[in-house]
Amino acid sequence: MAVAVAASLSTPAPSPAAGGRGRRRVNVAVASLRRAAAGGGSSWRSERRLMSELERTVTPGAAERVIRSYVASKSERAALAALSRLLMDSDPFAIPFYEAVTQARWFKWSSIHAAAVAALLESNGSAEESRSLISDSISRLHSTSSSSEEVSLFYCDLMAAFSSRGMRDRAMDFYSQLRASPPLSGKKTYTAMIKSLCLMGLAGEAEAALREMASRGHQPEAFQFGLVAKCYGKAGSMAEMERVISSMSDAGIRLGTGAANIVLSCYTSCRDHSRMLAWLRRMRKLRIAPTTKAFNFVLNSCPTVASMAQELGESLPLSTAELVKKLRSASPWPAEAELVQELLTSSSVLDKAMDWSESEVKLNLHGFSTIAAYVLILQWVDAMKARRALPLEVSVVCGIGKHSDVRGEPKVRELAQEVLSRMGSPLRLSMRNKGQLVAKRDRVKQWLATDWSSPVDEESTDQSPNGDNQQPFLLTLMRKLGQVLSPFLQFSKGKA
């Protein structure tokens, strides 16, 4: 793999004719690793220092020294986290970083990392190095007296890694080699194979593997059935999806919280609102509450709500009642409004996201998509209005974009700030935590006692020139001025 490492590290000096191509290549790597470092927890600062050093490197040797120094000085957990993010971002520095990791004293061979590196090598045109890495890995497994199950798991990881990069033919080659190996023996291996086959869109083969798994004495769980059912659903095979869902009860799987929410996620994969609605109602009758994941799945499959949360237009609904009303009048999908209303009848997701204490009430939006966060904020404000007593401080935890699709872009925070600002909320960005909005109890109680609503659509607005029509504008103007001046007033009070 040395040739591939050298190629990855080669960054020629930019020339006037090249227009700075050499420096741009370094910046691509730096930007992707910086986004990945946003999820690095306590290693965030050290990874930022790494980025600064990589930005200053102009030769392959200098970049290699920076990488090796980082791997040698950091913990195994921090180094492997950085490697995983580089691989997910297809970063050109991922190959030399992996080479440095393999030479660390704590290194332990990982099937997932080896498969991901092999796929990245081949997608970058280094097919020979990729095949060499795969061959060496299999030899390593055989020489260390590893079980056949570990070799099978490596083939499953190769299937997933190569298919995720669009190399379906190579993934099918690994599937053929997996089937040519000794018969699968473990439940873990069958689960990995079913997962990889579903990733490749091979629902029929995945279902056959599910049946084979049961015939060999390994009891399938709701998770495996859900993988196959969602694979059929994404392919548009609704009848097959329903059949697999029905077969869960035949396999003795009890309809608990996990199984019920897996079935719900199957329906969201094909955006069948009527089936989602019927299933949510069935869950309510069985007293099974939706989970946070199900909350995300359902709302992400609602196109009109998604459009509202993404566009944040002037007529954005600012309460759950307004939202449902707007969906009934504007959504081209008949069941979308009823689906959202049914989802809001349960407060289980909100209750889990809220943390009440004597000193603070906190709404935690971690784990929610921007669409789900928008609806949850509306539900939260309704719940806060119904409360008679509040603790000393109210806060909304939004994060700073560590888990966003594009790391470092705080989409949920931006949405929360915009929606709460339109409501006239006193919550402001904390000076101590840039991922949290805070306000004191008295100001929140005063805010909750006022009334606000979405701006009326222009076509339904009375254009008669009277003073009453100007009142909403004046209120909005005063509210905006208060929001701008609030931080300065708080600062001056602190100094006094």
Image (cartoon, grey):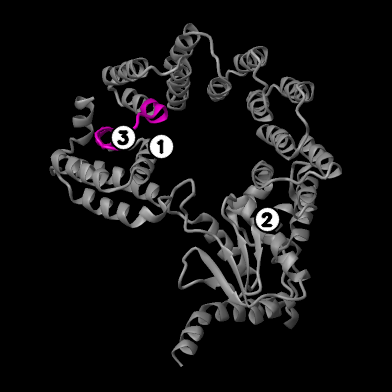
Q: Residue at x 41, y 37 (%)?
A: 88
Q: Residue 132 location, x and y as percent?
A: 28, 17
- The numbered disc on residue 107 is 3
At label 2, which amino acid type do we have? Lys
At label 3, which amino acid type do we have? Phe
At label 1, which amino acid type do we have? Met
**Residue 74 in view:** yes
Which residue is most to the bottom? 496
Q: Are marks 3 and 1 in contact (CB under 8 Å)?
A: no
Q: Residue 66 location, x and y as percent?
A: 20, 46
Q: Name the residue under label 2.
A: 352
Q: Which residue is drawn at 40% across and 26% down?
A: 111
Q: Name the residue under label 1.
A: 88
Q: In which quarter of the image is residue 122?
A: top left
Which residues, given as a range, are shown in magenta?
Answer: 94-115
Of labels 1 and 2, the one closer to you: 2
In the image, is residue 228 above or below residue 16? above
Q: Residue 232 location, x and y as percent?
A: 66, 23
In the image, is residue 284 above or below residue 171? below
**Residue 24 in view:** no
Which residue is most to the front? 145
Q: Residues within 10 Å of mark 3 (few under 14, many from 20)?
A: few
What is the quadrant of the N terminus in the image? top left
